[in-house]
Amino acid sequence: MPPGNDKVPAVVLVHGSGGIYNAGLDYWPKQFNAAGIAVFTLDMFGPRGVQSTAEDQSLVPFAADVADSFATLKLLATHPRIDAKRIAIMGFSRGGTATLRTAVERIITAQKLPDGLRYAAHIPTYGGGCAGVFRLVVKPGVFSKSPMLFIHGDADDYTPIGPCQDYADKIGKAGTPVGFVVIEGAHHKFDSDDQKRYNVRGATRTKADCPVEIDIDTLYAYDRMTGARLSGDAYLAALKGCGASAPRWRETRARVTRRRRPQSAS
């Protein structure tokens, strides 16, 4: 929490499949606090007795990530020093999927939040959810008008940048203010203090050419490349095409905070 007594904006940090890590407790809070922004780091795994879902995502349902994110929003809105209308969410990897979900109008409405409460901005960072069954068919009204800022490394081989650039472009054209920051040479989880490169053998990579996307209104699956509806054997075949390593540099992390936010995302 920044010093003082005035109301301040806040950002909720949502971790990825590896659980809470150093940057979520130290690096990012320091950056935001220095800018006068409060930080709440959400732990979705610890209270459930889980350390990591990298090799088994079913250990914690993705729906729990979304539920926890909205519960955090409601909690922060009651804090006397937090400006309830200026609470953003920043999600990393798996947490990026939750971040995108909290921007979906149909999901926001289902929360029955008081007084029009919603996240003021969404920041998926090397985020998941840009390809496969978590990707939605983008139409006007699917996503809220709250601005989005994507942050992604162009060397990410765990959640490739291509599908997120395409997704961001479509979301922007549908009416949501969207900015996209590309970090040259950055791999997955570039913000960690650990500079070693890891190969997570049991983890499922997001494949850039995965064609599946879901219509939030009908729950039908479609091929995002052709627009064709997928069902039966065609759907199963498409899923087979949707089946990591992560160098982490302090230098790369610092470059993110030096980058100016794109005008369209302000």
Image: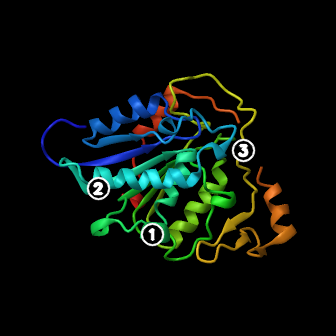
In percent of width and height, residue 105 lies at 46, 70
Q: Could you classify mark 1 by the number of other residues whose Cα lies within 10 Å: few (under 14), some (14-19), or many (20 or more)?
A: few
Residue receiving disc 3: 205
Cα distance, mark 1 to mark 2? 21 Å
Residue receiving disc 2: 86
Q: Amino acid at mark 1?
A: Ala
Task: Describe residue 88's horizontal placement relative to residue 215 as left or right.
Answer: left
Q: Could you classify mark 2 by the number of other residues whose Cα lies within 10 Å: few (under 14), some (14-19), or many (20 or more)?
A: some
Q: Quadrant of the N terminus?
A: top left
Task: Describe residue 250's horizontal placement relative to residue 260 as left or right.
Answer: right
Between 168 and 260, the one lying in front of the other is 168
Q: Amino acid at mark 3?
A: Arg
Residue at 51% in and 77% down: 140
Q: Image quadrant of residue 264?
A: bottom left
Residue receiving disc 1: 110
Q: Image quadrant of residue 211?
A: bottom right
Total numbered labels placed on residues in the image? 3
Q: Could you classify mark 3 by the number of other residues whose Cα lies within 10 Å: few (under 14), some (14-19), or many (20 or more)?
A: some
**Label 1 with label 2: CB-CB less than 8 Å:** no
